Amino acid sequence: MLKISNTLTRKKETLSFQKQGEISLYVCGATVYDHCHVGHARSAIIFDMIRRYLEYRGFTVRFVKNYTDVDDKIIARAEKEGRSWHEVADEFILAYDRDMDRLGISRPTVAPKATEHIVEMVRLIEDLVAKNRAYIVDGDVYFDVASFKPYGKLSHRHLEDLMVGARVEVDPRKKNPLDFALWKQSKPGEPTWESPWGLGRPGWHIECSAMAMKHLGKTIDIHGGGEDLIFPHHENEIAQSEAFSGETFASTWVHHSFVTVDQEKMSKSLGNFFTIDEIFKKSAQFPEPVIAEVLRYYLLSTHYRSPIDFSDQGLSAAKNGLDNFYTLFQKIEEISGDAKPQQDETLKPFQKNFEAAMDDDFNTARAIGVLQELRATANHSLKKGDLSKAWSAAEMLRTLGRLLGVLCVSSQDWRYQAWTASFQTSNGLDEKTIQSLITDRESARQNKDWAKSDQIRNQLAEAGIIIEDRPDGTTRVKR
RNA sequence: GGCGGCGUACCCAAGUGGCUAAGGGAGCAGUCUGCAAAACUGUCAUUCAGCGGUUCAAAUCCGCUCGCCGCCUCCA
């Protein structure tokens, strides 16, 4: 039984769904005004993992993740850079897609843009006005929070408490300080659409309601996002959607915690963030799929509802942890060639444990622990000469790892670069010199001229090339 | 002020009432090796921030104290 923590009930519940074998999943995507950082990566990786696991469990997942491409920040940036808001949005949608691809995130079933759903939003707002759930002030339309009794049910807040702590300047035209804009009158130069209330643009929360209901229906099985979205964004989505439809907007609300740096939330305002691109650049000595996997392994090694502190140390620990899997794969492949392994029934408990961990609110930390145990088992088998079992274990590791988006790289590509023409020169030594140095060292070793052999090894090390002599007599080159 | 979370070994991290407190990284020892490196194997918390309570039994439940963090404003 798959269990998920539901923010709405604050309980771990058995997954519920409307249609047998189908799950509708909506995730609030990015507001495209800047590059995404590790925090966005965590979010994307978590929901990608959830999607993969639901599919493994036999569900057809209809996954919608939107782009919010009309927003104050996009407008502000465009203004600052003297270009159109459209240009800004387009640029960062492209950047977002590129980053997600590099991270190995599967594309959503539908990736709608807010600006392509203005008609739906206007219709929704019109209906809310007609139902007296929203009111018009000088071309702006506000949702009347007081008209929606369950307001606060997701964030478990009481209206009175919220008002006490309100730190924002309250617009005196609002009936209630918590009322939020559904539609805003636009200023000159801003994105503008026609509406029954004059020229304007949508407020922040309405686009998600419009897109979610359009693509997934009035009730969604799972709605997710970062925990900072619980209030007010998701609370407001519930209010406007349920006031409109009269039905439950989402059955299960899934929220994940943040990436922190030195214990503090990674955020734009604190400036303590690393963009995805920076991460890739920083580790450019490795192929991109390797970096992506290291980051994913790292971010999934903590449960999604706990904060994770991001550090270089953590990143390299993740790399070391993954290296052990790939060394195993490589050893097995070298011995076994191309034949297909027999499935070893004695390994079944590992799969069961893995599934039990994932069924328990997607406990990826525990699931990774199971993979590590399976790896140790495979090594034992290898040592005992039970190649068939070791191989079968490796196959299982690949299969289960894929559900988390790890162990997907070929073992050749993982760490050792092939000695080919494409091998780039490094630190002043050209390829030819490197090759001849290695050849020289080989003959020195044959002649047991250890002094010379070591001298060449040091020379190469200074050029950033690491030599490993393997037990079978071959030499590996690493950079 | 309101709401919520966290504190487990040198580091990361699972476990939330009951076999010996998962797993990883680092360290250490052994195997292998001309030596290295890598890898593998083994080892590494009588104890879960502190104090008190409930219970036959608690890291896990309750209370208090200390420390840290998040949301209440745009934020994944």
Image: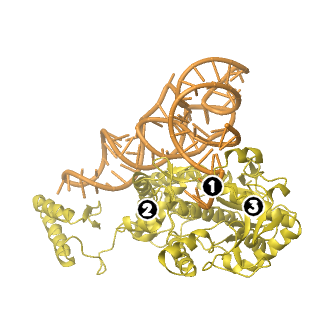
Chain colours: A yellow, B orange
Task: Please give the label number shown on residue A173.
Answer: 3
- Between A204 and A456, the residue placed more toward the observer is A204
- Between A340 and A95, the residue placed more toward the observer is A95
- Residue B33 screen position, x and y as percent: 23, 55
- Mark 1 or mark 2, earlier in chain: 1
Task: Please give the label number shown on residue A326.
Answer: 2
Q: Is residue A19 left or right of residue A368?
A: right
**Mark pair 3, 1: CA separation:** 27 Å
Report whether residue A206 is seen.
yes
Instruction: Name the residue beneath numbered marker 1.
Output: A228
Binning the other alpha carbons within 10 Å of mark 2 as few (below 14), some (14 to 19) or many (20 upward) gives many
Going 43% across and 56% down the picture, which residue do you hit? Answer: A315
Label 2: chain letter: A
**Mark pair 3, 2: CA separation:** 62 Å
Label 3: chain letter: A
Q: Is residue A91 left or right of residue A255?
A: left
The answer to which image quadrant residue A29 occupies is bottom right
- Mark 3 or mark 1, earlier in chain: 3
Tags 3 and 2 touching, CB below 8 Å: no
